[in-house]
């Protein structure tokens, strides 16, 4: 199962969810590959992988197709890019800052359909080696997010409890339908950074979500200091603070999604 974690807005918990869902699945003995599609490389850093000179990254995968055409650059396989993490069962396709330049090259050199399908075709060779492939997207709905959506069989849209974040969901759905070339029903909304004390705001947001009934995951991720601290320590929340509220929330999320995905 390939799962994209997407939202138009920044800072809504895409990376936090990608890392901790991936780790939660690995803890439950699933083989997991986390793909970092963000030039900010927060997922890469968050699972403790450091990039030194010579390390390949997701930009090399995206440019691979260019090489096939221009035969002047790396023409390897996604397997050469995959790195192991500290968490047994969890591998990562790392990212780095130069991915943004790659995006410019893809725009200038390739037609739309081709440049939006590169990730999907690169995953063919490793798809069967993993139970779950989780793709952390950058903010925005550009070529990187569209590549992730096209490759994904399921999409998680994390959203914070704010009007703008909820409004942004409609943008995600619009781009998703274009990426999928038609209606796409396999998606869920995840409420993150929830602060139960903000009662009025939470009530407002829940009302705004009425049109998305049945689409909102039952698990909510509460705002929890351990989650932030774990990111600073470059660990998942289960390793950093196993007894924390954050670990509990992400364990619930993992269970809820596993029920959804594996009871089919
Ligand atoms: N439940 C939470 N409790 C406390 N802090 C959180 C929680 N979820 C996320 N954060 C913190 O909020 C910030 C933004 O989260 P995150 O990096 O996951 O968002 P993002 O959507 O990936 O952002 P970007 O769009 O920049 O990639 C981070 O510093 C993260 O540690
Ligand atoms: Mg992020």
Image (tube, rainbow, N blue to C red):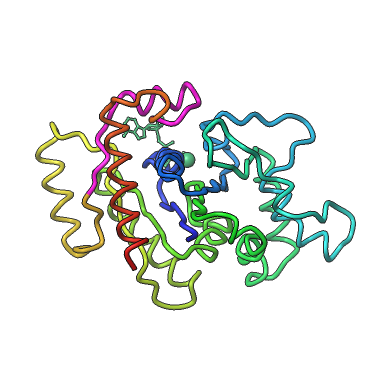
188 or 89, nearer to the observer? 89
Residue 50, picture quadrant: top right
Residue 116, picture quadrant: bottom right
Q: Is residue 258 placed above or below 16 in the rendered structure?
A: below
On whether residue 234 falls in the magenta region, the answer is yes
Q: Position of residue 95 (x, y in %)?
A: 63, 41
Residue lying at the far front in this picture: please name it: 29
Please name the residue shown 35% across and 48% down the image.
158
Residue lying at the far bottom in this picture: please name it: 182
Left or right position of 22 against 121: left
Please name the residue shown 18% across and 49% down the image.
205
Q: Is residue 192 placed above or below 116 in the rendered structure?
A: above
- Quarter of the picture holding the C terminus: bottom left
Q: Which residues are magenta?
A: 219-237
Q: Position of residue 54 (x, y in %)?
A: 79, 35
Left or right position of 152 against 248: right
Residue 250, picture quadrant: top left
10 or 122, nearer to the observer? 122
Q: Is residue 69 placed above or below 240 in the rendered structure?
A: below
On whether residue 236 falls in the magenta region, the answer is yes
Q: Ligand 1 sits in which quadrant?
A: top left
Left or right position of 62 against 147: right
Count of labels in the image: 0
Q: Position of residue 86 (x, y in %)?
A: 55, 30
Please name the residue shown 78% across and 31% down the image.
53
Q: Position of residue 167 (x, y in %)?
A: 29, 55
Please name the residue shown 32% across and 59% down the image.
188
Residue lying at the far right in this picture: please name it: 72
């Amino acid at each position: 199962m390939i799962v994209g974690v997407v939202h138009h807005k920044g800072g809504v918990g895409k990376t936090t969810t990608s890392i901790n869902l991936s780790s939660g699945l690995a803890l439950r003995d699933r083989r997991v590959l986390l793909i970092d599609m963000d030039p900010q490389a927060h997922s890469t850093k968050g699972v403790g992988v450091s990039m030194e000179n010579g390390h390949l990254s997701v930009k090399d995968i995206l440019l691979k197709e260019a090489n096939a055409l221009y035969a002047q650059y790396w023409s390897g396989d996604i397997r050469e890019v995959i790195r192991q993490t500290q968490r047994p069962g969890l591998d990562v396709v790392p990212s780095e800052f130069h991915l943004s330049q790659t995006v410019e090259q893809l725009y200038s050199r390739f037609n739309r359909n081709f440049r939006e399908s590169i990730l999907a075709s690169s995953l063919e060779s490793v798809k069967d080696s993993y139970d779950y492939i989780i793709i952390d997207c950058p903010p925005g709905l550009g070529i990187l997010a569209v590549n992730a959506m096209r490759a994904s069989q399921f999409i998680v849209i994390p959203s914070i409890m704010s009007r703008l974040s909820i409004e942004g969901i409609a943008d995600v759905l619009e781009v998703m339908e274009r990426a999928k070339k038609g209606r796409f029903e396999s998606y869920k909304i995840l409420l993150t950074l929830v602060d139960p004390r903000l009662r009025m705001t939470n009530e407002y947001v829940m009302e705004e979500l009425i049109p998305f009934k049945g689409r909102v995951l039952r698990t909510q991720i509460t705002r929890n200091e351990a989650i932030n601290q774990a990111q600073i320590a470059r660990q998942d929340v289960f390793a950093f603070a196993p007894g924390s509220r954050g670990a509990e929330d992400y364990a619930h999320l993992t269970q809820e999604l596993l029920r959804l995905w594996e009871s089919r």
